[in-house]
Image: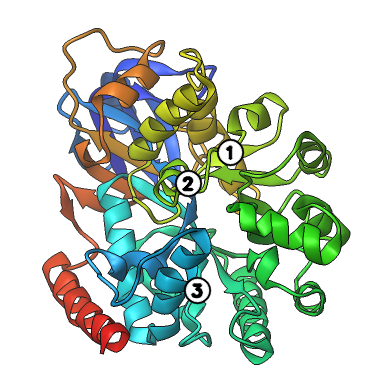
Amino acid sequence: MLIVGNGKLFTRDEKFSYIENGAAAVEGTKIAAVGTTEEIKKAYKDKEYKYIDAKGGVIMPAFINTHEHIYSAMARGLSIKGYHPKGFLDVLDGQWWTIDRKLTLEQIKYSAMDTMISCIRNGVTTIFDHHASFGHIKDSLFTIADAAKELGVRTCLCYEVSDRDGMEKAKEAVRENAEFIRYALRDESDMLAGMIGMHAQFTISDETMELAAANKPEEVGYHIHVAEGIEDLHDCLKKYGKRIVDRLYDCGILGEKTLLGHCIYINPHEMELIRETDTMVVHNPESNMGNACGCPPTMELVRRGILTGLGTDGYTHDMTESYKAANVLHKHHLCDTNAAWGEVPKMLFENNAVIANRYFKAPLGILKEGAAADIIVLDYDPPTRLDAGNLNGHILFGMTGRDVVATIGNGKVLMEDREVKVADTHEVMAKCREESAKLWKSING
C-alpha cells in the first residue's frame, strides 16, 4: 500500500482534473483512489502504507514515450573516423548502422539499463522502443526485456527488420520479432508487449515484407519509419511507382495496431489512408531537426483526427524536452504564433496514452481508480498561479524532466528523493562506460 500526497494533484481526468492538496492511494499495481490528502489519509488510517510526501510540489501521471531507440545509448560523445555526412543516408550508414553492426549482447543490455534509468529520472514509465543490432540479432529483444523487468519500466519492443545487411539477417530479424511477440503475449504482467519492427520501406523488399507478414501474430501491428528522409520517398516512387503509404497499404502494413514514425514527406492522400485505416503516427521533433530531415505536417495530422503521439527517437529521454522542441518547431515552420499550443500537449498527454493502451490493458496517462499506478512527483514551486487551466503552460515554460523527484511505475517506487531505487546506478554507469569503450574501439580500431 502506498500513498502519494501533499501536492498539487493533476489527474488528466476531465471529470476530476485538479486537487489543490491532493493524494493518490495505490494498492498493488493500480490506483485505488484519488482525493484530498486529508480524505485519503482518513480513508486508509487503519491500513499500513508507505507515504511519499510531495512537499507541495506537483503530482501527475508519469510520461509515455512512443518512439525510443535504446541501441543509440552508447553514441554519446562518439566520434567516428572518416564520418562526414552530407545527407540523411550518410547519417544512417555512417553512424547508426555502423554502431548497430558492432553491438554485442552485453552492450545491448547496458544500453537498455542506461536508457531506462534515464527514463525513470525523467518520469517516463512506458516506452515503445525500436531496436537494431545487426551485429547480434538473436535474443536482443529478450535482453532488453530483462532490463525492463529489472527496472520496472513498461516496454513495447520490436526489432528493426531490414535487407540492408542481406536476406539471412532479415530473416533472423523477423524470427526475433516473432519469437519475442509470442513471449510477450504470454506475459501476464501488462508490462511487456511486442510489435513487428521495420526500418523503412527503402531497405525492405517485397519478399521481406511478405515474410514479416507471414510471421506476424494477428494481435499486433508494425512499428516502422515512414518518409523520414526525402530519399525514402524517391526510392519508393522509382522502384514501385507509388508513394510510401500506398506501398505500405498494399503490403497490409497499415491498421490500428501499427505505428508510423516521422511521416515527414507524405501528402494529403496518404494522410487520408492513414486516417481511414486508424493507423498511429509518432512525431520526433528534435531528431527531425538534428538530422536536417525537415518538418512533418504534424499539425495537419492532428487536425485531421489521425492518432498522433510524441516520441524522442532516442535523442533525449525527457518528454518535456520534446514538448518544448515541438512547440517552437511548428510555430517557426508555419510562421504561426498560434500553432502547436493545443496540438502538442494533446499528443503528449492524451494521444500517447491512447497509443499505449492499444498494447497495454490498464488505463495509462491518467490518475483515477483502476488506472495503472504510474505516478510522478515534481519539485516545482512556481512564481505564478498554477491550476488545471494552465498546467501545460507551466510544464512548457517552467519544468524539465529533471524536476521529477519521485517516480512510481506500476505501483512500484522506482525513484524517491531523486535516488533510483531499482538499480545501483554507480555500478551500472561504470559498466556502461566499460562496454561503450569496447564498442568505440570496435568501431574506430
Which residue position holds label 2? 288
Task: Judge by depth and name the residue closer to the eye, 356 or 299.
Answer: 299
Q: Is residue 337 above or below residue 255?
A: above
Q: Residues within 10 Å of mark 1 (few under 14, many from 20)?
A: many
Q: Residue at x 25, y 70 (%)?
A: 79
Tell which circle, 3 or 1, labels the residue nearer the N-terminal end: 3
Query: Which mark is nearer the camera, 3 or 1?
Result: 1
Label pair 1/2, CB-CB below 8 angstroms:
yes
Q: Position of residue 288 (x, y in %)?
A: 47, 46
Q: Quadrant of the C terminus?
A: bottom left
Q: CA distance from mark 3 to mark 1?
A: 24 Å
**Label 1 or label 2, whichever comes before in sequence order:** 2
Q: CA distance from mark 2 to mark 3?
A: 19 Å
Amino acid type, label 1: Pro
Q: Amino acid at mark 3?
A: Ala
Percent x, y of residue 377? 26, 35
The secondary structure type at the circle numbered 2 is helix
In three-dimensional space, the C-alpha distance between marks 1 and 2, rounded to whole angstroms, equals 8 Å
344, above or below 296, in the image: above
10 Å neighbourhood of mark 3: few (<14), some, or many (≥20)? many
What residue type is disc 2 on? Asn
Which residue lies under the disc numbered 3? Answer: 132
Residue of label 1: 296
In depth, the one of 320 and 54 nearer the eye is 320
The numbered disc on residue 286 is none
Kindly tell me whether residue 206 is visible in this rendering: yes
Q: Is residue 39 left or right of residue 302?
A: left
Q: Residue at x 32, y 76 (%)?
A: 82
Residue nearest the observer in this picture, 171 or 109: 171
Look at the picture and state if 91 lies above or below 321. Answer: below
Q: Quadrant of residue 185?
A: bottom right
